[in-house]
Image: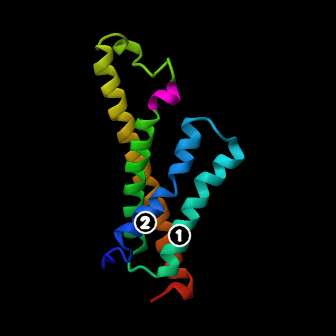
Amino acid sequence: MRSKALGLSPIVILALAVLGVPRVIAHDLRLVGPAVNALLVFLPIAVWLAVVLWKRVPNPFLTLLAVGVVHGILLGLTHQVLWSESFGDTPPTLGGNLAGALSPATEAVLLRTFAFGSSLLTGVGVGAATGAVGWLASRLIPATRR
C-alpha cells in the first residue's frame, strides 16, 4: 500500500531507512576505516534521493523526512543493542559537577536516553537536509517533474 502523502509505501520507507544500519554497526564495532565509513554514510543517502526522484513522489522533502525519522529510530535502537560491545568495560559516564551524583543505573539510563534522542535528531536532520536537496532537485531536473 502506497501512502498518498509520501508517495512510497511504509515498507519502502523502512527499506530505505535500513540502508543506513550497516554504517552504524560498522562504526560501533570499529569494523571499517574512514574510506569505507564515508561510503556507508553517503551511499544510502544517494539511494534515498535516487528513489524519491525516480518515483516522482509528491513531496520529496516530506518523504525523505519520514525516511530520516525511521532511520533515526533504527540508529538509536542499533546503538542501544551494541552499547556494551561498543564501550566494553568503560561505558560513558557523567562528568563535571554531575560525576558520581547519580547511581550507576540512573546514570546509564540517562546517558542511553540522551544517546537515543541524539540518534533520533541525527536521523531527522539527515532526512530534512536530504529532503531539501530532493525537493530542489525535483524542481530543477525536468525529468523529475510531474
Check contact, mark 1 vs mark 2: CB within 8 A: yes
Give, as a single range, the part of the protein colored magenta.
Answer: 83-87
Residue 76: % across, % down: 40, 43
Along the line of sight, which residue is nearer the eye, 35 or 85?
Answer: 85
Which of the image's four quarters has the C terminus? bottom left
Residue 56: % across, % down: 46, 82
Label 2: which secondary element:
helix
Mark 2 Cα within 10 Å, few/some/many (few <14, many 20+)? many
Q: Is residue 74 above or below residue 27?
A: below
Q: Is residue 5 above or below residue 83?
A: below
Mark 1 Cα within 10 Å, few/some/many (few <14, many 20+)? many
Prevailing SS of the magenta stretch: helix
In the figure, is residue 23 to the left or right of 96? right
Circle 1: residue type:
Leu
- Taking the magenta stretch, the answer to whether it contains residue 137 is no
Q: Which residue is mark 2?
A: 64
Q: Which residue is mark 1?
A: 49
Q: Is residue 52 above or below residue 91?
A: below
Residue 98: % across, % down: 34, 15
